[in-house]
Amino acid sequence: MSPDRKIAIRRLTTDDYDAIRDIWVRSGLTSLRLKGRDAPGEFARQMESGCQIALGAELDGKLVGVVLATHDGRKGWINRLAVDPEYRRRGIAKALIAEAERVLREEKGMRIIAALIEADNEPSLELFQSVGYHLSRDIYYLSKRENPDV
C-alpha cells in the first residue's frame, strides 16, 4: 500500500450491516450465524444494547475490514475481526485491533481484553499473539445454545 493511501477507521452503524456482512462472508469467517446471532435484527439489537461497537477500516472510501468490540461489563472482547482477502497483509487487522482495544479501555473501562479464535485459524492466532495476546492452554470454552444459529 502506498504511503498516500491511508486507512481510516470509523464507527459503523446498523446502516452498514450489508457491507459488514459482505466482508465477513468474503473473508471466509466460519463462525458466522447469518440466520441467528449475526442476522440483521440480532446485529441491531446488539448494537442498541451499548455492549457492542462495530468498527470499520476504509481505504479510499471502501470498507475493507471490520471488527466488533464487545464487553460483558468486566471483560472486553474482540469479535468478528475480518479483512477483505484483497486487502490483507497491509496492517488493517492490527489497526482494527488497536482501535477496538482503545475503545474498550478508554470508553468502556475494560482492563482485560480477550479474543476467542477457532483452533484451526492459525493466521488469526499468530496475528493476536503478534500484538501481545497470550495463548491460554488451560481454559476450556463451553457454551449452551438454544440452537446452532444463536
Image (spheres, grey):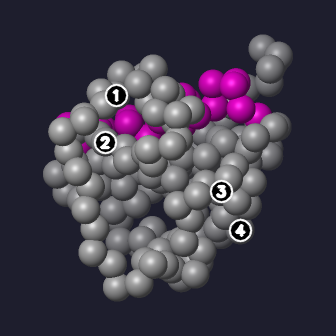
- Marks 2/4 in contact by CB < 8 Å: the verdict is no
Work out how far the residue at label 2 is from the one at label 1, CA to CA, in angstroms. Answer: 8 Å
Mark 1 or 4, which is nearer the eye?
1
Type of residue at label 2? Ala
Mark 4 or 3, which is nearer the eye?
3
Q: Residues within 10 Å of mark 3 (few under 14, many from 20)?
A: many
Task: Indicate the secondary structure of the residue bearing disc 2.
Answer: strand
Task: Indicate the secondary structure of the residue bearing disc 3.
Answer: helix
Work out how far the residue at label 2 is from the one at label 4, CA to CA, in angstroms. Answer: 26 Å
82 in the magenta segment: no
Type of residue at label 3? Trp
- Marks 1/4 in contact by CB < 8 Å: the verdict is no
Residue 124 image offset from top left, x and y in percent: 52, 36
Which label was assigned to residue 99?
A: none
| Residue that label 2 marks | 114
Task: Indicate the secondary structure of the residue bearing disc 4.
Answer: helix
Q: Nearer the viewer, residue 124 or 45?
A: 124
109 in the magenta segment: yes
Task: Indicate the secondary structure of the residue bearing disc 1.
Answer: loop
Work out how far the residue at label 1 is from the one at label 4, CA to CA, in angstroms. Answer: 30 Å
| Residue that label 3 marks | 24
Type of residue at label 1? Tyr
Which label was assigned to residue 18?
A: 4
State which tag comes first along the sequence, 4 or 3: 4
Tell me if I can see residue 45 in this picture: no
In the displayed structure, 110 sits above or below 14; it is above
State which tag comes first along the sequence, 3 or 1: 3
Query: Which residue corresponds to the image point at 52% horizontal and 34% vertical from the top-left?
Result: 122
